[in-house]
Image (tube, rainbow, N blue to C red):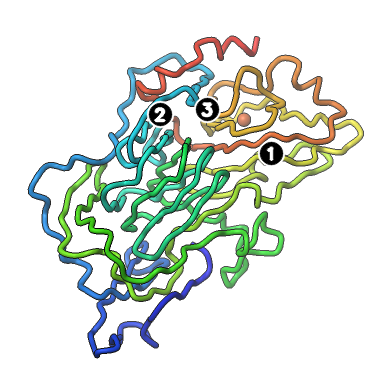
């Protein structure tokens, strides 16, 4: 939720008549969060937005809910996603790797557009575009995204993805929503001047107006299950909308990193807050400048967090054996830190070119069979 956007035709006041050029009444849709207490957008449709029929056949689309493998030994883990091969639209080919009640983390390599409209009523989606780009088409307009963008899809928004070229995405499904951390807002909700990004750093949807793609199938994820509907007409019939709930994209390199005389904890790289998780961006930056500084991260026992790190690009100063597309998972209960030699060798360095996305989760993560299939079995012992 950022600043208010207003696009197309809207009534001059909430909940009063808006009419078309021939006097046709438009239909409001109040798209709300937290009942009617939270942020909202108001859309104006050509037709009633609630006329879907139950699909006559079982749903054929939708990614599979994660299932945990049997309990395993507590260990540091490394999963290599770069070699994975999946094909199809993102809605059918997402692979879940790690999850708890707050978050599902996985990867996807979409090869074609979603053939249906989708609404996820269980969770907000935050997708990091490691490779690729494309368009997120929704009832609010088109959001064009590129490599290195986080793409945010609000829970319940009717949409579909149109990827352009080869793709490799990290996706996070966040049950309790995802937000700009509170500390980055002033009392009127504006992003503070000392926040690590400003309103101008976000990409927003381009409003298009009513159109018909000929698609009438619509699926909704609720309770971890996909439910199918058939629409009477094109749902892309919005003539205007305003509000603060809408999809956006944030290029990771727009994040302004912090550096101190000595090493700052990962919290300072906090980019987005979610229930049960903090999402951090590690971007190229100067490093700690105290004459006796140790720029490499200190070993730590973060006893209340599981940590997953998705390695994007650059030279990962603290880790060996990982590469672009690697995911490390360091569970609570075990101290973790740099690989042998990295701590010592970092002394005297002045900058790092690493690019990575991290999620610290406050509840333990379980792995799926797909994660086991791409696991590097030697990772735990590689720290000895
Ligand atoms: Fe850590």
Q: Real-space Cα distance between discs 2 and 1? A: 26 Å
Mark nearer the N terminus (2 vs 1):
2
- Residue 348 left/right relative to 168: right
Q: Is residue 381 above or below residue 17?
A: above
Q: Where residue 382 sits: x, y (%)?
A: 61, 11
Q: Which mark is residue 327?
A: 3
Q: Examine the image and state in which quarter residue 85 appears.
A: top left
Query: What residue is shown at x 23% (from left), y 58% (from top)?
Result: 214
Q: Where residue 192 sits in the image (x, y, percent)?
A: 66, 64
Answer with left or right where residue 252 lies relative to residue 98.
right
| Crowd band around label 2 with a 10 angstrom C-alpha radius: few (<14), some (14–19), many (20+) | many
Q: Is residue 172 above or below residue 208?
A: above
- In the image, is residue 32 above or below residue 317? below
Q: Any mark on residue 97, and which?
A: 2
Which secondary structure lies at badge 2? strand
Q: Nearer the viewer, residue 96 or 160?
A: 160
Q: Is residue 184 left or right of residue 56?
A: right
Q: Nearer the viewer, residue 213 or 341?
A: 213
- Residue 199 picture location, percent across and down: 60, 64
Residue assigned mark 1? 265
User: Taking the image as four quarters, which one is ligand 1 found in?
Assistant: top right
């Amino acid at each position: 939720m950022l600043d208010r956007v207003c696009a197309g035709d809207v009534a001059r006041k909430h909940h009063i008549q808006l009419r078309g050029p021939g006097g046709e009444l438009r239909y409001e849709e109040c798209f709300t969060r937290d009942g009617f207490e939270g942020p909202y957008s108001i859309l104006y449709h050509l037709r009633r937005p609630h006329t879907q029929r139950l699909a006559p056949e079982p749903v054929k689309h939708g990614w599979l809910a994660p299932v945990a493998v049997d309990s395993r030994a507590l260990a540091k883990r490394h999963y290599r996603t770069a070699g994975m091969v999946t094909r199809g639209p993102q809605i059918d080919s997402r692979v879940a790797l790690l999850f708890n009640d707050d978050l599902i983390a996985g990867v996807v390599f979409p090869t074609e557009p979603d053939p249906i409209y989708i609404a996820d009523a269980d969770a907000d989606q935050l997708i990091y575009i490691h490779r690729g780009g494309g368009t997120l088409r929704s009832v609010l307009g088109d959001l064009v995204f590129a490599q290195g963008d986080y793409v945010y899809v609000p829970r319940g928004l009717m949409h579909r993805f149109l990827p352009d070229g080869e793709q490799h995405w990290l996706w996070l499904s966040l049950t309790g929503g995802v937000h700009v951390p509170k500390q980055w807002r002033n009392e009127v909700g504006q992003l503070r001047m000392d926040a690590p990004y400003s309103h101008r750093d976000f990409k927003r949807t381009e409003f298009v107006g009513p159109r018909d793609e000929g698609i009438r199938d619509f699926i909704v994820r609720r309770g971890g299950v996909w439910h199918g509907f058939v629409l009477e007409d094109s749902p892309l019939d919005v003539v205007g909308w305003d509000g603060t709930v809408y999809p956006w994209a944030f290029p990771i390199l727009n994040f302004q990193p912090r550096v101190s005389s000595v090493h700052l904890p990962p919290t300072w790289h906090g980019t987005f807050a979610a229930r049960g998780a903090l999402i951090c961006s590690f971007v190229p930056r100067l490093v700690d400048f105290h004459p006796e500084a140790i720029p490499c991260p200190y070993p730590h026992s973060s006893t209340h967090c599981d940590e997953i790190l998705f390695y994007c690009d650059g030279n990962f100063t603290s880790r060996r054996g990982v590469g672009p597309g690697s995911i490390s998972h360091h569970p609570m209960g075990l101290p973790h830190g740099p690989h042998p030699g990295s701590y010592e060798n970092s002394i005297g360095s002045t900058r790092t070119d690493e690019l990575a996305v991290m999620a610290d989760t406050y509840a333990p993560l379980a792995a799926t069979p797909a994660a086991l299939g791409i696991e590097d079995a030697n990772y735990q012992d590689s720290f000895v």
